[in-house]
Image: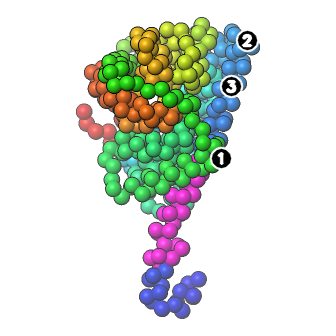
Amino acid sequence: MSSLNRLLPRRLRVVLRRHGPEALVWRRRVAIVGGAVLVGLVALVFAEVADRANAWFHLLSARWWWAPLLVTPAGFAAIAWLTNRFAPLARGSGIPQVMAATKNPQAALSTLVSLRAAVAKFVLTAAALLTGASVGREGPTVQIAAAIMGHMHRILRIPLRSSVYIAGGAAGVAAAFNTPLAGVAFAIEELAAAYEQRMTLLVMAAVLIAGMVSLGIAGDYIYFGAMRQTLSLPQALVVTPVAGVVGGLAGGMFSRLMLSAGTTPLAAMVWLRARPVVFAAACGGVVAILGVATGLTWGTGYEAAHTIIAGADVPAWFGAAKFATTLATAVSGLPGGIFAPSLSIGAGIGDLLRTLFPGYPPGAIVLLGMVGYFTGVVRAPLTAVIIISETTASRGLMMPLLAAALVGEFAAQLVCKEKLYHGLSQRFLPAAGARAPRP
Protein backbone atom coordinates (compact mmCIF):
# COMPACT_ATOMS: atom_id res chain seq x y z
CA MET A 1 0.00 0.00 0.00
CA SER A 2 2.84 2.39 0.84
CA SER A 3 4.59 1.60 -2.48
CA LEU A 4 1.34 2.26 -4.33
CA ASN A 5 1.01 5.60 -2.56
CA ARG A 6 4.50 6.57 -3.71
CA LEU A 7 3.46 5.96 -7.32
CA LEU A 8 0.46 8.28 -7.05
CA PRO A 9 0.75 12.01 -7.66
CA ARG A 10 1.22 14.06 -4.51
CA ARG A 11 -2.08 15.92 -4.93
CA LEU A 12 -3.98 12.67 -5.34
CA ARG A 13 -2.35 11.26 -2.20
CA VAL A 14 -3.47 14.33 -0.26
CA VAL A 15 -7.02 13.98 -1.56
CA LEU A 16 -7.14 10.29 -0.62
CA ARG A 17 -5.77 11.02 2.82
CA ARG A 18 -8.42 13.67 3.44
CA HIS A 19 -11.41 12.12 1.69
CA GLY A 20 -10.60 8.46 1.02
CA PRO A 21 -12.02 5.41 2.81
CA GLU A 22 -9.42 5.68 5.59
CA ALA A 23 -9.99 9.38 6.18
CA LEU A 24 -11.10 10.51 9.61
CA VAL A 25 -14.45 11.74 8.33
CA TRP A 26 -15.32 8.31 6.90
CA ARG A 27 -14.12 6.46 9.97
CA ARG A 28 -16.27 8.76 12.12
CA ARG A 29 -19.33 8.04 9.97
CA VAL A 30 -18.72 4.31 10.20
CA ALA A 31 -18.39 4.59 13.97
CA ILE A 32 -21.66 6.54 14.25
CA VAL A 33 -23.66 4.23 11.99
CA GLY A 34 -22.13 1.00 13.34
CA GLY A 35 -22.42 2.13 16.94
CA ALA A 36 -26.04 3.21 16.52
CA VAL A 37 -27.01 -0.08 14.86
CA LEU A 38 -25.31 -2.03 17.66
CA VAL A 39 -27.05 0.14 20.28
CA GLY A 40 -30.43 -0.63 18.72
CA LEU A 41 -29.73 -4.38 18.67
CA VAL A 42 -28.38 -4.50 22.22
CA ALA A 43 -31.29 -2.41 23.50
CA LEU A 44 -33.77 -4.89 22.00
CA VAL A 45 -31.94 -7.87 23.51
CA PHE A 46 -31.75 -6.09 26.86
CA ALA A 47 -35.48 -5.35 26.75
CA GLU A 48 -36.28 -8.99 26.04
CA VAL A 49 -34.02 -10.28 28.82
CA ALA A 50 -35.40 -7.73 31.30
CA ASP A 51 -39.01 -8.54 30.43
CA ARG A 52 -38.39 -12.26 30.85
CA ALA A 53 -36.64 -11.75 34.18
CA ASN A 54 -39.58 -9.65 35.38
CA ALA A 55 -42.07 -12.28 34.19
CA TRP A 56 -40.18 -15.13 35.90
CA PHE A 57 -40.27 -13.28 39.21
CA HIS A 58 -44.02 -12.73 38.85
CA LEU A 59 -44.48 -16.46 38.25
CA LEU A 60 -42.47 -17.20 41.38
CA SER A 61 -44.45 -14.81 43.55
CA ALA A 62 -47.76 -16.07 42.14
CA ARG A 63 -46.92 -19.70 42.89
CA TRP A 64 -45.37 -19.19 46.33
CA TRP A 65 -46.51 -15.92 47.90
CA TRP A 66 -43.93 -16.19 50.67
CA ALA A 67 -40.94 -16.79 48.36
CA PRO A 68 -40.13 -13.08 47.81
CA LEU A 69 -39.66 -12.65 51.56
CA LEU A 70 -36.59 -14.86 51.17
CA VAL A 71 -35.54 -14.28 47.57
CA THR A 72 -35.73 -10.47 47.44
CA PRO A 73 -33.60 -9.56 50.51
CA ALA A 74 -31.07 -12.29 49.67
CA GLY A 75 -31.00 -11.21 46.03
CA PHE A 76 -30.47 -7.55 46.95
CA ALA A 77 -27.58 -8.51 49.23
CA ALA A 78 -25.98 -10.76 46.60
CA ILE A 79 -26.28 -8.18 43.81
CA ALA A 80 -24.91 -5.42 46.07
CA TRP A 81 -21.93 -7.62 46.97
CA LEU A 82 -21.25 -8.51 43.33
CA THR A 83 -21.58 -4.87 42.27
CA ASN A 84 -19.25 -3.53 44.97
CA ARG A 85 -16.77 -6.36 44.47
CA PHE A 86 -16.54 -6.52 40.68
CA ALA A 87 -18.21 -3.45 39.12
CA PRO A 88 -18.78 -0.57 41.54
CA LEU A 89 -19.20 1.87 38.66
CA ALA A 90 -22.24 -0.08 37.43
CA ARG A 91 -24.36 0.72 40.47
CA GLY A 92 -27.49 2.83 40.21
CA SER A 93 -29.14 4.26 37.13
CA GLY A 94 -26.29 4.70 34.66
CA ILE A 95 -27.27 8.19 33.58
CA PRO A 96 -25.11 9.92 36.25
CA GLN A 97 -22.14 7.86 35.07
CA VAL A 98 -22.58 9.08 31.49
CA MET A 99 -22.91 12.68 32.65
CA ALA A 100 -19.68 12.34 34.62
CA ALA A 101 -17.99 10.61 31.68
CA THR A 102 -18.50 13.67 29.47
CA LYS A 103 -16.12 15.63 31.74
CA ASN A 104 -13.14 13.48 30.70
CA PRO A 105 -14.09 11.29 27.72
CA GLN A 106 -10.73 9.55 27.27
CA ALA A 107 -10.29 8.45 30.88
CA ALA A 108 -13.95 7.50 31.33
CA LEU A 109 -13.77 4.88 28.58
CA SER A 110 -11.71 2.72 30.94
CA THR A 111 -13.92 3.36 33.97
CA LEU A 112 -17.46 4.74 33.85
CA VAL A 113 -18.31 3.55 30.33
CA SER A 114 -15.95 0.60 30.09
CA LEU A 115 -17.06 -2.70 28.61
CA ARG A 116 -16.78 -4.21 32.10
CA ALA A 117 -19.26 -1.66 33.46
CA ALA A 118 -21.60 -2.15 30.50
CA VAL A 119 -21.67 -5.95 30.74
CA ALA A 120 -22.12 -5.79 34.51
CA LYS A 121 -24.96 -3.29 34.06
CA PHE A 122 -26.72 -5.62 31.62
CA VAL A 123 -26.41 -8.72 33.77
CA LEU A 124 -27.01 -7.17 37.20
CA THR A 125 -30.04 -5.11 36.13
CA ALA A 126 -31.64 -8.29 34.79
CA ALA A 127 -30.74 -10.00 38.07
CA ALA A 128 -32.35 -7.15 40.02
CA LEU A 129 -35.59 -7.61 38.07
CA LEU A 130 -35.34 -11.34 38.70
CA THR A 131 -35.46 -10.63 42.45
CA GLY A 132 -38.42 -8.22 42.25
CA ALA A 133 -36.49 -4.94 42.51
CA SER A 134 -38.37 -1.80 41.46
CA VAL A 135 -36.02 -0.83 38.64
CA GLY A 136 -36.24 0.05 34.97
CA ARG A 137 -33.92 -0.74 32.07
CA GLU A 138 -33.88 2.70 30.42
CA GLY A 139 -31.16 4.29 32.58
CA PRO A 140 -28.90 1.22 32.27
CA THR A 141 -29.47 1.28 28.50
CA VAL A 142 -28.05 4.82 28.45
CA GLN A 143 -24.79 3.70 30.10
CA ILE A 144 -24.52 0.59 27.92
CA ALA A 145 -25.19 2.61 24.76
CA ALA A 146 -22.59 5.24 25.68
CA ALA A 147 -20.03 2.47 26.24
CA ILE A 148 -20.82 0.94 22.84
CA MET A 149 -20.49 4.26 21.04
CA GLY A 150 -17.27 5.12 22.86
CA HIS A 151 -15.58 1.81 22.12
CA MET A 152 -16.68 1.89 18.50
CA HIS A 153 -14.86 5.21 18.16
CA ARG A 154 -11.77 3.84 19.90
CA ILE A 155 -11.64 0.77 17.63
CA LEU A 156 -11.67 3.04 14.58
CA ARG A 157 -9.02 5.34 16.13
CA ILE A 158 -11.25 8.41 16.35
CA PRO A 159 -10.61 11.02 19.06
CA LEU A 160 -13.23 10.84 21.80
CA ARG A 161 -15.35 13.84 22.65
CA SER A 162 -18.16 14.24 25.13
CA SER A 163 -20.58 14.37 22.21
CA VAL A 164 -19.86 10.68 21.53
CA TYR A 165 -21.29 9.67 24.92
CA ILE A 166 -24.18 12.10 24.59
CA ALA A 167 -25.08 10.62 21.20
CA GLY A 168 -24.80 7.07 22.55
CA GLY A 169 -26.94 7.83 25.59
CA ALA A 170 -29.59 9.57 23.47
CA ALA A 171 -29.65 6.61 21.09
CA GLY A 172 -30.14 4.35 24.10
CA VAL A 173 -33.21 6.30 25.23
CA ALA A 174 -34.63 6.25 21.70
CA ALA A 175 -34.15 2.49 21.37
CA ALA A 176 -35.39 1.67 24.88
CA PHE A 177 -38.70 3.51 24.51
CA ASN A 178 -38.97 3.43 20.69
CA THR A 179 -39.14 7.23 20.91
CA PRO A 180 -36.56 9.00 18.69
CA LEU A 181 -37.73 12.51 19.56
CA ALA A 182 -37.36 11.77 23.26
CA GLY A 183 -33.77 10.72 22.63
CA VAL A 184 -32.94 14.07 21.08
CA ALA A 185 -34.70 15.98 23.87
CA PHE A 186 -32.89 13.92 26.50
CA ALA A 187 -29.54 14.71 24.92
CA ILE A 188 -30.28 18.43 24.97
CA GLU A 189 -31.87 18.67 28.43
CA GLU A 190 -30.13 16.14 30.59
CA LEU A 191 -26.88 14.75 29.22
CA ALA A 192 -25.39 17.91 27.73
CA ALA A 193 -24.82 20.86 30.02
CA ALA A 194 -24.22 22.99 26.93
CA TYR A 195 -25.56 21.67 23.65
CA GLU A 196 -22.92 22.39 21.02
CA GLN A 197 -23.85 22.90 17.40
CA ARG A 198 -21.13 20.52 16.21
CA MET A 199 -22.74 17.54 17.98
CA THR A 200 -26.15 18.05 16.35
CA LEU A 201 -25.50 15.73 13.40
CA LEU A 202 -23.88 13.11 15.61
CA VAL A 203 -26.81 13.00 18.04
CA MET A 204 -29.47 13.06 15.34
CA ALA A 205 -27.81 10.34 13.28
CA ALA A 206 -27.25 8.03 16.26
CA VAL A 207 -30.79 8.49 17.57
CA LEU A 208 -32.47 7.96 14.20
CA ILE A 209 -30.40 4.90 13.29
CA ALA A 210 -30.89 3.24 16.69
CA GLY A 211 -34.60 4.07 16.51
CA MET A 212 -34.90 2.59 13.01
CA VAL A 213 -33.19 -0.62 14.11
CA SER A 214 -35.58 -0.93 17.05
CA LEU A 215 -38.56 -0.08 14.85
CA GLY A 216 -37.54 -2.47 12.11
CA ILE A 217 -37.14 -5.46 14.43
CA ALA A 218 -39.70 -4.85 17.20
CA GLY A 219 -42.29 -3.15 14.99
CA ASP A 220 -44.11 0.16 15.34
CA TYR A 221 -45.39 -0.45 18.85
CA ILE A 222 -46.58 2.16 21.37
CA TYR A 223 -44.93 1.54 24.75
CA PHE A 224 -48.03 2.08 26.93
CA GLY A 225 -50.67 1.72 24.22
CA ALA A 226 -52.62 4.48 22.49
CA MET A 227 -54.58 6.95 24.63
CA ARG A 228 -56.69 9.29 22.50
CA GLN A 229 -58.55 11.28 25.18
CA THR A 230 -58.21 15.06 25.25
CA LEU A 231 -59.19 17.90 27.56
CA SER A 232 -61.26 20.96 26.77
CA LEU A 233 -59.66 24.32 27.51
CA PRO A 234 -61.67 24.93 30.73
CA GLN A 235 -60.85 21.42 31.95
CA ALA A 236 -57.14 21.85 31.16
CA LEU A 237 -57.01 25.19 32.99
CA VAL A 238 -58.40 23.55 36.13
CA VAL A 239 -56.60 20.22 36.30
CA THR A 240 -53.20 21.02 34.77
CA PRO A 241 -51.83 23.16 37.64
CA VAL A 242 -53.12 20.67 40.21
CA ALA A 243 -51.40 17.74 38.48
CA GLY A 244 -48.21 19.77 38.06
CA VAL A 245 -48.04 20.84 41.70
CA VAL A 246 -48.91 17.45 43.20
CA GLY A 247 -46.69 15.48 40.83
CA GLY A 248 -43.81 17.97 41.02
CA LEU A 249 -43.80 18.06 44.83
CA ALA A 250 -43.85 14.25 45.01
CA GLY A 251 -41.08 13.94 42.42
CA GLY A 252 -38.99 16.58 44.15
CA MET A 253 -39.40 14.69 47.43
CA PHE A 254 -38.14 11.50 45.78
CA SER A 255 -35.07 13.34 44.49
CA ARG A 256 -34.37 14.92 47.86
CA LEU A 257 -34.65 11.62 49.72
CA MET A 258 -32.51 9.88 47.10
CA LEU A 259 -29.73 12.48 47.32
CA SER A 260 -29.93 12.72 51.11
CA ALA A 261 -29.52 8.97 51.54
CA GLY A 262 -25.90 9.23 50.42
CA THR A 263 -24.98 12.27 52.49
CA THR A 264 -27.13 12.41 55.63
CA PRO A 265 -25.13 12.41 58.89
CA LEU A 266 -27.76 10.37 60.75
CA ALA A 267 -25.94 7.69 62.74
CA ALA A 268 -28.13 4.83 61.49
CA MET A 269 -27.58 5.77 57.83
CA VAL A 270 -23.84 6.26 58.34
CA TRP A 271 -23.65 2.78 59.86
CA LEU A 272 -25.64 1.26 56.99
CA ARG A 273 -23.64 3.05 54.27
CA ALA A 274 -20.49 1.54 55.75
CA ARG A 275 -22.09 -1.91 55.30
CA PRO A 276 -23.54 -1.84 51.76
CA VAL A 277 -24.50 -5.52 51.67
CA VAL A 278 -26.43 -5.26 54.94
CA PHE A 279 -28.02 -2.04 53.71
CA ALA A 280 -29.07 -3.69 50.44
CA ALA A 281 -30.57 -6.65 52.32
CA ALA A 282 -32.57 -4.26 54.51
CA CYS A 283 -33.83 -2.41 51.44
CA GLY A 284 -34.71 -5.75 49.88
CA GLY A 285 -36.71 -6.56 52.99
CA VAL A 286 -38.73 -3.36 52.55
CA VAL A 287 -39.36 -4.17 48.88
CA ALA A 288 -40.35 -7.76 49.72
CA ILE A 289 -42.77 -6.84 52.51
CA LEU A 290 -44.53 -4.17 50.44
CA GLY A 291 -44.58 -6.41 47.39
CA VAL A 292 -46.08 -9.38 49.22
CA ALA A 293 -48.60 -7.14 50.99
CA THR A 294 -49.75 -5.37 47.83
CA GLY A 295 -48.90 -7.69 44.96
CA LEU A 296 -48.53 -4.64 42.69
CA THR A 297 -45.16 -3.04 43.33
CA TRP A 298 -42.74 -5.56 41.81
CA GLY A 299 -40.45 -4.78 38.90
CA THR A 300 -40.74 -1.94 36.43
CA GLY A 301 -44.40 -1.17 37.14
CA TYR A 302 -45.13 -1.19 33.41
CA GLU A 303 -48.18 -3.44 33.70
CA ALA A 304 -49.75 -1.33 36.45
CA ALA A 305 -49.17 1.91 34.55
CA HIS A 306 -50.58 0.41 31.36
CA THR A 307 -53.78 -0.76 33.08
CA ILE A 308 -54.26 2.59 34.87
CA ILE A 309 -53.94 4.50 31.59
CA ALA A 310 -56.43 2.08 30.03
CA GLY A 311 -58.98 2.96 32.72
CA ALA A 312 -58.58 0.21 35.32
CA ASP A 313 -58.72 1.10 38.99
CA VAL A 314 -55.91 0.42 41.45
CA PRO A 315 -55.92 0.86 45.23
CA ALA A 316 -55.44 4.44 46.41
CA TRP A 317 -52.18 3.50 48.11
CA PHE A 318 -50.53 2.14 44.94
CA GLY A 319 -48.57 5.32 44.13
CA ALA A 320 -47.22 5.63 47.68
CA ALA A 321 -46.28 1.94 47.86
CA LYS A 322 -44.50 2.05 44.50
CA PHE A 323 -42.75 5.25 45.62
CA ALA A 324 -41.42 3.45 48.71
CA THR A 325 -40.23 0.34 46.83
CA THR A 326 -38.55 2.41 44.11
CA LEU A 327 -36.79 4.59 46.68
CA ALA A 328 -35.66 1.53 48.66
CA THR A 329 -34.32 -0.08 45.49
CA ALA A 330 -32.59 3.08 44.29
CA VAL A 331 -30.79 3.87 47.55
CA SER A 332 -29.66 0.25 47.90
CA GLY A 333 -27.17 0.81 45.06
CA LEU A 334 -28.46 -1.99 42.84
CA PRO A 335 -27.86 -1.47 39.11
CA GLY A 336 -31.11 -0.31 37.56
CA GLY A 337 -32.97 2.75 36.38
CA ILE A 338 -35.89 4.76 37.69
CA PHE A 339 -37.55 5.86 34.44
CA ALA A 340 -40.18 3.12 34.20
CA PRO A 341 -40.89 2.96 37.96
CA SER A 342 -41.28 6.76 38.00
CA LEU A 343 -43.83 6.60 35.20
CA SER A 344 -45.67 3.94 37.20
CA ILE A 345 -45.67 6.11 40.34
CA GLY A 346 -46.90 9.04 38.25
CA ALA A 347 -49.74 6.87 36.96
CA GLY A 348 -50.66 6.09 40.58
CA ILE A 349 -50.73 9.82 41.34
CA GLY A 350 -52.86 10.37 38.25
CA ASP A 351 -55.25 7.65 39.43
CA LEU A 352 -55.73 9.59 42.69
CA LEU A 353 -56.28 12.85 40.80
CA ARG A 354 -58.96 11.44 38.53
CA THR A 355 -61.10 10.66 41.57
CA LEU A 356 -61.03 14.42 42.31
CA PHE A 357 -62.25 15.24 38.80
CA PRO A 358 -64.91 12.57 38.08
CA GLY A 359 -66.36 14.29 35.03
CA TYR A 360 -63.02 14.67 33.25
CA PRO A 361 -61.46 12.18 30.78
CA PRO A 362 -59.71 9.75 33.18
CA GLY A 363 -56.86 8.72 30.88
CA ALA A 364 -55.88 12.34 30.27
CA ILE A 365 -55.77 13.01 34.03
CA VAL A 366 -53.48 10.01 34.52
CA LEU A 367 -51.03 11.28 31.89
CA LEU A 368 -50.92 14.70 33.54
CA GLY A 369 -50.05 13.03 36.84
CA MET A 370 -47.34 11.02 35.10
CA VAL A 371 -45.72 14.03 33.44
CA GLY A 372 -45.89 16.09 36.64
CA TYR A 373 -44.19 13.42 38.75
CA PHE A 374 -41.65 12.37 36.11
CA THR A 375 -40.62 15.99 35.60
CA GLY A 376 -40.32 16.42 39.36
CA VAL A 377 -37.86 13.53 39.50
CA VAL A 378 -35.67 14.06 36.42
CA ARG A 379 -36.23 17.83 36.05
CA ALA A 380 -36.32 17.62 32.26
CA PRO A 381 -39.80 18.84 31.24
CA LEU A 382 -39.32 18.61 27.47
CA THR A 383 -38.05 15.04 27.72
CA ALA A 384 -40.94 14.10 30.03
CA VAL A 385 -43.56 15.53 27.67
CA ILE A 386 -42.11 13.86 24.58
CA ILE A 387 -41.63 10.48 26.29
CA ILE A 388 -45.21 10.39 27.57
CA SER A 389 -46.63 11.73 24.33
CA GLU A 390 -44.74 9.19 22.20
CA THR A 391 -45.33 6.23 24.52
CA THR A 392 -49.09 6.84 24.60
CA ALA A 393 -49.72 8.46 21.17
CA SER A 394 -51.44 11.31 23.04
CA ARG A 395 -50.46 14.15 20.77
CA GLY A 396 -53.76 15.90 21.40
CA LEU A 397 -52.59 16.55 24.97
CA MET A 398 -49.26 18.16 24.12
CA MET A 399 -50.12 21.62 25.46
CA PRO A 400 -51.66 20.42 28.79
CA LEU A 401 -48.74 18.01 29.23
CA LEU A 402 -46.21 20.77 28.64
CA ALA A 403 -48.00 23.09 31.05
CA ALA A 404 -48.14 20.39 33.74
CA ALA A 405 -44.44 19.64 33.21
CA LEU A 406 -43.44 23.28 33.60
CA VAL A 407 -45.53 23.62 36.76
CA GLY A 408 -44.02 20.34 38.03
CA GLU A 409 -40.50 21.65 37.37
CA PHE A 410 -41.24 24.77 39.43
CA ALA A 411 -42.89 22.80 42.25
CA ALA A 412 -40.01 20.32 42.46
CA GLN A 413 -37.52 23.14 42.97
CA LEU A 414 -39.39 24.11 46.15
CA VAL A 415 -38.53 20.71 47.62
CA CYS A 416 -35.16 19.89 46.04
CA LYS A 417 -32.93 22.56 44.53
CA GLU A 418 -30.43 20.14 43.02
CA LYS A 419 -31.27 18.02 39.99
CA LEU A 420 -31.20 14.33 40.80
CA TYR A 421 -28.93 13.05 38.02
CA HIS A 422 -26.59 16.02 38.27
CA GLY A 423 -26.27 15.50 42.01
CA LEU A 424 -25.60 11.78 41.61
CA SER A 425 -23.08 12.40 38.82
CA GLN A 426 -20.83 14.36 41.21
CA ARG A 427 -20.10 11.09 43.03
CA PHE A 428 -18.68 9.57 39.84
CA LEU A 429 -16.43 12.47 38.82
CA PRO A 430 -13.31 11.02 40.53
CA ALA A 431 -13.72 7.84 38.45
CA ALA A 432 -13.83 9.99 35.31
CA GLY A 433 -10.62 11.74 36.31
CA ALA A 434 -12.45 15.04 36.77
CA ARG A 435 -12.82 17.21 39.83
CA ALA A 436 -16.16 17.92 41.40
CA PRO A 437 -17.06 21.61 41.39
CA ARG A 438 -16.67 23.46 44.64
CA PRO A 439 -19.94 24.15 46.44
> Callout 3: 10 Å neighbours few (<14), some, many (20+)?
some
Is residue 84 positioned above or below 109 on the image?
above
| Discs 3/2, front | 3
The residue pinned by badge 2 equals 64
Depth order, front residue of 241/162: 241
Going from N to C along the chain, the mark reached first, 1 or 3, is 3
- Look at 47% across and 18% down and name the residue there: 362
Circle 3 residue: 55
Rendering coords of residue 268 (x, y %)? 42, 12
Image depth: mark 1 or mark 3 in front: 1
In this figure, which residue is indicated by the disc labeled 1? 217
Query: In the figure, is residue 136 to the left or right of 367?
Result: right
Q: Where are the magenta residues, as a range? A: 17-40
- Is 82 situated left or right of 203 in this image? right
In reply to whether residue 29 is colored magenta, the answer given is: yes
Task: Say what secondary structure mark 3 lies in.
Answer: helix
Q: Secondary structure at mark 1?
A: helix
